[in-house]
Amino acid sequence: MSASEADLRPVAVPRTARPQAPRARTMASLRRERDTLRGLTEAGDPTGIERQHGLGKRTARERLALLLDEGSFVEFGMFRRRRDEGPATEGRRPHTDGVVTGSGTIDGRRVFVYAQDFTILGGSLGAEHARKIHRVMDLALDGGAPVIGLNDSGGARIQEGVAALDGYGGIFRRQVAASGVIPQISVILGPCAGGAAYSPALADFTFMVRGAARMYLTGPDVIAAVSGERVGHEELGGADVHGGRTGVAAFVRDDEEECLEDVRHLVSLLPENNLARPPEAPPAGADADTRPRLAEIVPAEPNKPYDMREVVAELADDGDFLEVHEGWAPNVLCALTRVDGAVVGVVGNQPMVLAGVLDSDASQKAARFVRFCDAFNIPIVTLVDVPGFLPGTGQEHAGVIRHGAKLLYAYCEATVPRVQVILRKAYGGAYIVMDSRSIGTDLSLVWPSNEIAVMGAEGAVNVVHRRELRAAADPEARRAELIADYRERLMHPYRAPEEGFVDDVIDPADTRSAVARGLALLRDKRREPPRRKHGNVPL
């Protein structure tokens, strides 16, 4: 072995100590020190890694390897460490400071990433940890590329006090600045507590893994101390809680591998930024594609349920779509898919749940999805089968008016191409809110089974003819006659087309081709909103 080769052999260097320069400084020895330190930093602490694996979790670098294209990751700030503050930090200044940051590609498209490392100080956020995240977020915004955060942290580093809190503030400010400019994805793979929970709440999409992810502002111990209430981590802020009750998590998955694979899938459907179009696939011949099964899926009877997912699958290329917030407010369906190679967002009432009515949660869910699609140039297809808003004091007192107004606002503000398809019922204010012509949809199509009215025939007759029915010799027979008359005069499938409120009555089997042709003719739509600082959304 030559002397130069001997100089390049790795040597053991403690992770928390700066390597000592040799007495005779040579380029070979400097390279050796650099390679040794880098290798030890990348390898991580064996004890911490073993503990992480024992919890059923991967390390930060293992997660990045699953998320990104092989060999594409470029790391920033590997050698960064917390400040040396004497005895308080002695032996506790590991390189990376508990977060791996950098950039890579997903299917060849650039993304910026940070992954908190629970094996180092519990992934807690201190000043340098935060500055690394700030740096990668700034680069993502400047470069116009999505930013993805892999969260697995014990929260703010208590020892660093207000500096840690300031670090979180810097993250939140950057997230707001990037909102609607670049896609932001948050992935919860472990604890995410305290102020840290606001970062996923500000992201466009949040993923959580069952059994490992947990997110809350105050933990079980604090709640027990303050209120005496006993609650477990999973019950308080587990993946199913946020996926099904709070709506914070857009996607809940069973394990890290499935979760990160779906993050890749989501990125494949999103543009790099608000100035780019979503990535296109080759056309699939949708403009001439008939789907007779659609007429079989949807019953002609207005009160019979069916699964709107089956309708979306018939419209989508290869039947493939990615549903958002599947577990929360399932009476409305939101999904990203492709129609003839073009990415579209789909909003549809779900007759399988609460007959597809709109309520407070469904309105919020759909409104946020519509606003995201509009911000990132994704056309919107709205599938309507809605009997109205959910009645009751519970909904009224929960602010269904205000929440319904969010959906109304989102559609009215949207400037992307919009296609509405009314399958069956479209009653009252819910008809207006579900992207009717009156609030700006570009193309309104209806099936021959459509019923557009202020309310259903039975309810309308009971209100309009209540005195006549009370005086009738046979109220039930007279009610049946009046209902039949109301349907024939005011709810027949060609009433709205005759008055110009919809553009065409289509064969259900032609829905995919009609939507594809409509999106094609609207592809280059341009509509500039009025000049203003911003609107006042009814939050």
Image (cartoon, grey):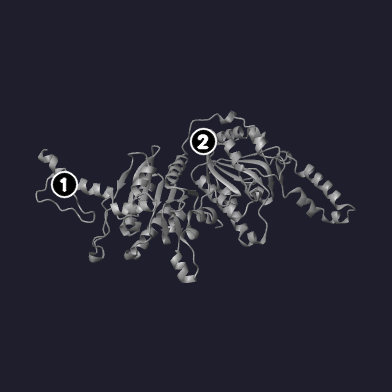
Query: Are the two marked residues, 1 and 2, in contact with CB atoms closer than 8 angstroms?
Result: no
What's under tag 1, amino acid-wise? Leu
The answer to whether residue 273 of the structure is visible from this angle is no
Q: Dividing the image into 4 quarters, which one contains the C terminus?
A: bottom right
Q: Is residue 164 visible?
A: yes
Q: Position of residue 241 (x, y in %)?
A: 51, 56
Q: Residue at x 45, y 58 (%)?
A: 215
Residue at image point 82% right, 55% down: 466
Q: Nearer the viewer, mark 1 or mark 2?
A: 1
Q: What residue is pinned by disc 2?
A: 342
Q: Crowdedness of circle 2 by 10 Å Cα count: few (<14), some, many (20+)?
A: many
Q: Does 350 sit left or right of 171 as displayed?
A: right
| Nearest the eye: 520 or 327 | 327
- In the picture of the structure, the residue carrying the numbered disc 1 is 30
Q: Residue furthest front?
A: 54
Which comes before the other along the chain, label 1 or label 2? Answer: 1
